[in-house]
Amino acid sequence: MINLSLLTPEIIVLITALIVLILDLLPWRGRKVLLATVGVLGTVGALLITMGQWDLREEAFYGMVAIDNFSVYFKALFLIICTLTILLSINYITRGGIDLGEYYSLVLLATFGYMFMASGTDLITIFLALEILSLAVYILAGFMRHSPKSNESAFKYFLLGAFSSAFLLYGIANIYGVVGNTNLKDIAQYLSQEAALKNPLFLAGMGLLLVGFGFKVAIVPFHMWTPDVYEGSPTTVTAFMAVGTKAASFAAFLRVFFYTLEPLKGQWVPVLWLLAAVTIIFGNTVAIYQKNIKRMLAYSAIAHAGYILVAMVAGNDLGSSSILYYLLVYSLMNLGAFGVVIIVEKKEEENLTISDYRGLAYKHPMLSAAMSLFLLSLAGIPPTGGFVGKFYIFSAAVSGGYVGLAIIGVLGSAIALYYYLRIIVYMYMYDPEKEFLDGPVPFFSAAALVITAIGTILLGITPARILELAHYSISYLGH
Amino acid sequence: MDTSLSLFGDYQVIHNYLPILVFIIFAFAFAIGTLIFSYLVRPNKPDPEKLSPYECGIPPMMDARERFSIRFFIIAMLFLLFDVEVVFLYPWAVVYNKIGLYGFVEMMLFIAILLVGYIYAWRKGALEWE
Amino acid sequence: MLDYIWLVPTFPLIGVTINGLLGKRLPKKLVGLVACGALGLSFLVSVIIFFTLLHLPPEQRYLEKVLYTWISSGAFRAEAGFQLDPLSAVMILVVSGVGFFIHIYSIGYMHGDKGYARYFAYLNLFAFFMLLLVLANNFLFLFVGWEGVGLCSYLLIGFWYERKSAADAGKKAFVVNRIGDFGFALGIMLIFSTFGTIDYSEVFQAAPEKFSPGALIITAITLLLFVGATGKSAQLPLYTWLPDAMEGPTPVSALIHAATMVTAGVYMVARCHVLYLLAPISLTVVATVGALTAIFSASIGLAQNDIKRILAYSTISQLGYMFLGCGVGAFSAGIFHLMTHAFFKALLFLGAGSVIHALAGEQDLRKMGGLRRNLPITFPTFLVATLAIAGLPGFSGFFSKDEILWEAFSSPHGHFIYWLIGIVTAGMTSFYMFRLVFLAFFGSSRIETDRTHHIHESPPSMTMPLIILALLSIIGGYAGVPHVLGGANRFHSFLSPVFSGHHGGGDVVDPSASTEIVIMTMSVLVAVGGFLLAHRMYIKRPEVPAILADKARWLYQLIFNKYYVDEIYDFLFVNSIKNGANRLWQLFDVRVVDGSVNGIANLAGQGSSLLSQLQSGYVKSYAASILIGAALIIGYYVLR
């Protein structure tokens, strides 16, 4: 069955993107705020409908798309990310002189792609979704057309993205070659035969999938693009892709590996173990030496992908639910941290080095308090959501028998504390030398910060409910 | 050929594609073989007129490999887009009787989405040369 | 109605949120209104809950409301929830009620301060954490509140952080409390490892079943918890922070000394009475520490000249009484004294604040005198509080103090020595409190001339709470009139479901009622004696104190300098810790940590220079990285 009505949220997002595109053509001066408003309304509407799909467990497009709790959880997450990104962007893109209507449209289209990453149950659907989101994000990365760095970042992202897409596609082809089908259910069916588990062609395909997803979620050694692209892109876009693209890729990654390739666990767990360890160590070590805050957050994002891999390796009940939990926390705290960077940043790439933050607390106490909260959460200090997330992940790893990996993870977080705290030290321990903002903190950005801050704290104080949701989401995967 | 058969022999799907592989090999062999054959048997008497590129009879003025306006690309891309739209219309028209109203609505949606793109391109001035 | 218990801490939290976020932009009146309104509403809810509880039959006066599961991982399961029983009902009444009056008083007292909104945000936060502490249904939540009030005391004592002494006092309070908290945290961990849970009801149910009285582990737990209580409730040897805590604004001192913070330790011991009754040694320790603290700090109070400092030492001394009560097993007597003390001590501090306010910041008793004519409301209310704390019959302090003294004498856990210490302390208390009153309000004025024109009674927002608290200081005691005086001791019977099955004190109609009368008469006589002595020394013959101080010079100096405890601590701990820390810092931090950090940094630096060659900016090298990674993975799968 096609069941088009099940895709209402996606369709709303798509139509909103088109409406925004058309509205921008109106010869009306105040239209930019209208565009953002329409965008937010569309995403919030889609969010409400998505929430109504909880516990639906349906399929659409002849089994190519699933509306299960897993996809609902992730789609809600993407829509929240999209809303927050739009809120953070309103002021930023005007300041940066890039307030074109296409911006919101592309953000919405990328979100459209994200949503299919979570709900796709066919390798082809997943690949298409990946391309939809990638194309949108490539353009967004280069949206500061007059900035060479932005151009460079878009181009690098595009080239390497295409390169890695080829790996993914080749992996899909290999698997198709062996199974004769690209549907995840059929592949799972195929893998129920004992002999199938040792097929080298299939294993090679799985390895290639790993490379393709590994690139998108930025794990070592497929991470090299991250610092350059994150640094060059407009900061709102950096925030959007650091959070959205990563979460979306993890959604597809999880569905393919946790559900379809579950029988091959013995094959991919050792590889992921190694990748997780290398990613955590590498991301955290290199982050120490970054002077640009966006680059630092890029390496921190790499390290965080490593933590999530730890939970994937653990693979038990707690581990799998903690991935979903952690992705939510990660999105909120990272968007918050980037949000502060967005507010503080000035034109011509001013205020982007870490030492630029000296004395921020004396000029903008609330902003610094929020930034400290997000950084402490990223570092995993209670009572923030970041702490609970890491707590769950590492205790899952320990109870899953991966004590070594848990130790590496904890050590990595200890290193991370250094570079997160350094910013707090700069904000609080030094005297300010300049004015940071030209005016007051923009209203919509402040609203986004408040939402993320409350979310970060709430997830730290009342984690059990969300963890339960996460548990229900992932345990119904494919059932 | 024998080894590849044993490697893929167990996998029915790959087996099905074997004729295509054979076909590709034959195609390449035929093309290369023809070129080699003609190279061997043709007479070879070059002169400057023969080696210069042919431009509708007019003598070539300068190097053909120069940069040209981005507008060509935009027009080409737009052409491609809407050309594909038309390509989709053909099979749709052929099976229209079988898919009925549902198919009609779907195609209208498809066209509507493309129409948005068309309006966008138009209003953004992608179709104007200056 | 009982289900709305969560509202009680929620209102102050809302107040914190509003004043903390928007306080700077709101008009001052609104800030005060929000803060007072928030606590006023919690007080209202507390009152309603109290009466709802009163209407229930005693055995149903219990409610546990689990809000949510905070963390569940393996065997560890922490549920955050509230527990309502008569004990916590009394506590929320005291905290929100007395706190509410202090809030109102602060409106007048702080009206000129530039940190007005910040002050009220902290004040509300303080109340929030304290309410959380007394409503918790598990040790973890208790600990959150425990740490929270510690944090708030630091913020409020150091409220005028530009003043070095205030900042230092804040730091001292924080550090001394941390020492206690360390023991407290250890105690909680020990509870968890022993019982596998940190839920009150489960722990208290399991303890008597699993352990017989005198079990070593229970003794260890209770002693560790008590270490925390000595820090928070300022008992020997961790009391030194409390006298310095007066560096904060005076209403804060009132809040810390009367309603919140210091009562936490007493509450915690009473809450854990099941455990303490299983550990006779710990009970003895509690009683002994309480008795010694009581007499020790009362003796210091005899010779101080700073009006707030005297009150601070009297707080420590009164807290000693409460611990003495708990230590002899009379938990409800301890809580009773906690309540009456909250009334009259808040009143004393607020009255002292009114005096200081009138004298534009003067705190030295030697520069006061004759104020009773100038402060027509402050004086009588202050006098009421003094009569109450001195334990003169008819005032609240009389009933509660007397119950403790009687229990110290007659309870199976009690001892004659405890009673003796208690009654001597009572005499001292009476003496130094009347000395204070005489020096401040009677006699001729010794006020510096430039301050005289300024003297005025405080505004109504400050005097209203004084009057109400004075009323409470009088009638508060009638909740617990002992049987021997023909009362029913309602307070005790209200608390009896909590302390049921144990000897709670007060209810035993002793066969030797005459003994109780004798004991009671003696404490009255001692109180009157203190009054008469003070009257003789400071009204009739004001030259006597100087002669006395001269004759017993060394004793006077010893007491005047607070037994040099601060200096001894400085010498023994602070300096040696500083030195040790310095040495450690040089040894450990510079060599080991910095060394290793620098080592790692160098390593990372070299690594990063290596890695930065990888991070060349060339797309081809990035692609190569992907390719190598892919080749390794595929190679692993195919060639294995």
Image (cartoon, grey):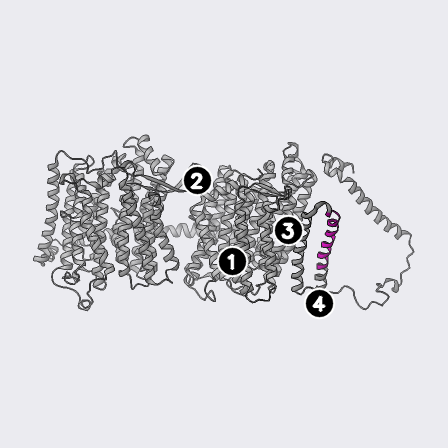
**Which SS type dominates the magenta stretch?**
helix
* Residue visible at 19% across and 65% down in the picture: C455
Q: Which residue is mark 4?
A: B129
Task: Determine the image quadrant of residue C547.
Answer: bottom left
C-alpha span from label 4 to label 1: 37 Å
Q: Residues within 10 Å of mark 4 (few under 14, many from 20)?
A: few
Q: Can residue C616 be seen at all in this image of the molecule?
A: no
> In this figure, which residue is indicated by the disc labeled 1?
A87
Q: Residue at the spot x=47%, y=64% of the render?
A: A436
Q: Nearer the viewer, residue B114 or A337?
A: B114
Q: Label 3: which residue?
A: A131
What residue would you read off at disc 2?
A: C72
Chain of the residue that carries numbered disc 1 in the rendered image: A
Q: Are marks 3 and 1 on the same chain?
A: yes
Eye-nearest disc, 1 or 2? 1
Image coordinates for residue A244, horizontal then vertical, percent: 56, 51
Count of numbered badges drawn on the protein: 4
The reply to whether the magenta stretch includes residue C284 is no
- Chain bearing tag 2 is C
Residue type at the position of mark 1: Leu
